[in-house]
Amino acid sequence: QVQLVESGGGLVQPGGSLRLSCATSEFIFRMASMGWYRQALGGQRELVGIITNDGTTNYAGSVKGRFTISRDNAKNTVYLQMNSLKPEDTAVYYCYTQYGDDYWGQGTQVTVSS
C-alpha cells in the first residue's frame, strides 16, 4: 500500500515562508510523479504543482515564482517551499501521487494571516 506522509504547515504572516514535506517509499519515489494540491475552506481541491521522477516541475499560475517543488532522492521526500505567502494561500495542502490508483497524503493546514 502506498503511503504519503506529510509534515510542515502552520500559521505564518503574509510575506512569510513555509516548507512542506512528503515522504513515501523508495519504489514510488523512483517510479511516479508527485504533486501538491490544496483545498481552501469551501473551495475545490486545486493543483499547486507537480514534479516528475526526473525532476521536471510545473506550477499553477497563482503560485509560479513563489513556490518551489523539489526532491531529495536520499530521503525519498518531496518538498514544497512556499515563499511570499499570501492570505489566499490559506488551505489544507495535500501530497499526491498516482501509480495505478490515486494516493493522497493526510493533509496539512497552512494559514496565512496577520
Image (cartoon, helix red, strand yellow):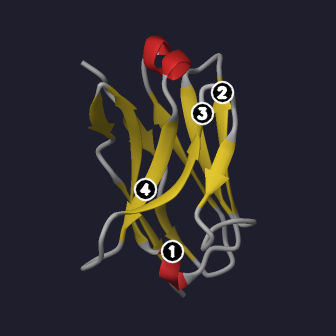
Crowdedness of circle 2 by 10 Å Cα count: few (<14), some, many (20+)?
A: few
Q: Read off the residue under disc 3.
A: 52
Q: Read off the residue under disc 4.
A: 37
Indicate the position of residue 29 as horizontal and vertical percent values. Answer: 51, 21
Kindly state the secondary structure of the residue where label 4 is placed: strand
Indicate the position of residue 11 as horizontal and vertical percent values. Answer: 48, 70
Depth check, mark 1 against mark 4: the one in front is: 4
Q: Earlier in the sequence, mark 1 or mark 4?
A: 4
Residue drawn at the location 48% of the way across and 50% of the way down: 36
Give the quarter of the image for residue 114: bottom right
- The relative height of residue 3 versus residue 80 in the rendered view (above or below) is above
Quadrant of the drawing holding the N terminus: top left
Kindly state the secondary structure of the residue where label 1 is placed: helix
Residue drawn at the location 33% of the way across and 64% of the way down: 45
Kindly state the secondary structure of the residue where label 2 is placed: strand
Alpha carbons under labels 3 and 2: distance apart: 13 Å
Crowdedness of circle 4 by 10 Å Cα count: few (<14), some, many (20+)?
A: many
**Mark 1 vs 3: CB contact within 8 A:** no
Residue drawn at the location 29% of the way across and 45% of the way down: 106
